[in-house]
Image (tube, helix red, strand yellow):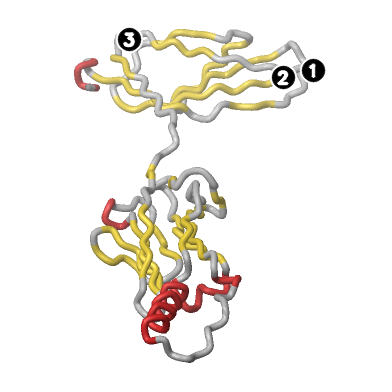
Amino acid sequence: MYLGHWHRFPFFSQVRLLVGLTALALLAACLDIPDSPNPEIADFRISVYITQKDKSDSTLLKIHPENPATLKAEVFPKSLEPELKFSWYRNALLGEKSSYRIPSDPEDSEIPNKLVVKDREGNSISVEFKITVNSAPGFYPDLYGTKNTPFTFSWNAVDIEDDVLNYTLEIDTTVYPVGSLEKIQQSGLAPGIHLFRVIVVDSEGDMDSLPFVKFYVVDTLEAAK
C-alpha cells in the first residue's frame, strides 16, 4: 500500500556540496568550481507502502491480521538504493533492510511506525507513518433454545426449469422428508450442539443442499450467556 504522498528531500551529497562552496568563498582559494550536482539525484524521494497477498493499495497503510504482510521502502531514483541503509523502528529497532515482514496476528510491538534512511556518511532522513490493522466483518450466527423451544426451520430454492421441488430436512442424523414445504417447527430436542441442513431435489433427480448449520439446545437460556 502506498503512502498517500511521496516524502521529498534533497539528496545528501547536495548538503556537502553547499558546505564546500561556503568554505571556498571564505578562503578565497583559486580552485575550480565543482560540477553541478547530478540531475538524477537532485530530487530524492522515499515512499512507504505495504503488500499483502500480492496486493498493494495506494491510499492506506492497512493490513488484515489473518495474513502476513510486507512493509516496503521505495526510493527514487532506484539506483540510489544500494548506497542507503534502511532501519525500521517501533520504539526499538525492528529491521535493517529496505523491506520488513509483519507476521500474521502481530503484536503492536512488531509493527513499525518509523523508517530511518542513512547514507554512507551517516546523514539521515526519517519517515513516520501509521499502519492500521483491521479484520473484515464476518457472520457468526448463534442460535440458542431450550428443549421446550420450538425451533423454526425455513428455506427456499429456485429452479428455473422445474417447479416441482421436494425438500428433505436433516437434523443431526435424522432425515425428515417434508415434500414441498419450505418451513417447519421442531421442539423436544435434547440439550447440546445440533446440526441441520436442507436438501432439495427436482423432478429429474438433480439435487442441491445447504451446508450444515450449527445450533444449540441448553437447559435454560441463562446458560447460553
How far from the left and from the top, in percent, is residue 109?
26, 56
Name the residue at the left extreme: 222
C-alpha separation, residue under disc 2 versus residue under disc 1: 9 Å
Front residue of this view, candidates 188 and 63: 63
Helix, strand, or loop for circle 1?
Answer: loop
Q: Quadrant of residue 143?
A: top left
Which residue is under mark 3? Answer: 149
Secondary element under disc 3, as helix, strand or loop, is loop
Confirm or deny contact between disc 2 and disc 3 (CB under 8 A): no
Residue flagged by tag 1: what amino acid is it?
Glu
Single out the mark in the foreground, 2 or 1: 1
Identity, as a three-letter code, of the amino acid under mark 2: Asp
Labelled pair 2, 1 in contact (Cβ < 8 Å): yes
Q: Position of residue 1 (x, y in %)?
A: 51, 50
Name the residue rendered at 55%, 71% in the picture.
41
Label 3 Cα neighbours within 10 Å, binned few <14 / some 14-19 / many ≥20: some
Question: Residue 15: x, y in percent?
Answer: 42, 73
Q: Residue at point 43% right, 28% down?
A: 139
Residue 202 shows which numbered tag? Answer: 2
Q: Within 10 Å of the Cα at label 2, are there few (<14), some (14-19), or many (20+) other Cα atoms?
A: some
Dot placed on the residue nearer the N-terminal end, 1 or 3? 3
Residue at the front extreme of this rendering: 28
Q: Secondary structure at mark 2?
A: strand
Real-space CA distance between mark 1 and mark 3, rounded to the nearest whole angstrom:
38 Å
User: Which numbered disc flags the more N-terminal residue, 2 or 1?
Assistant: 1
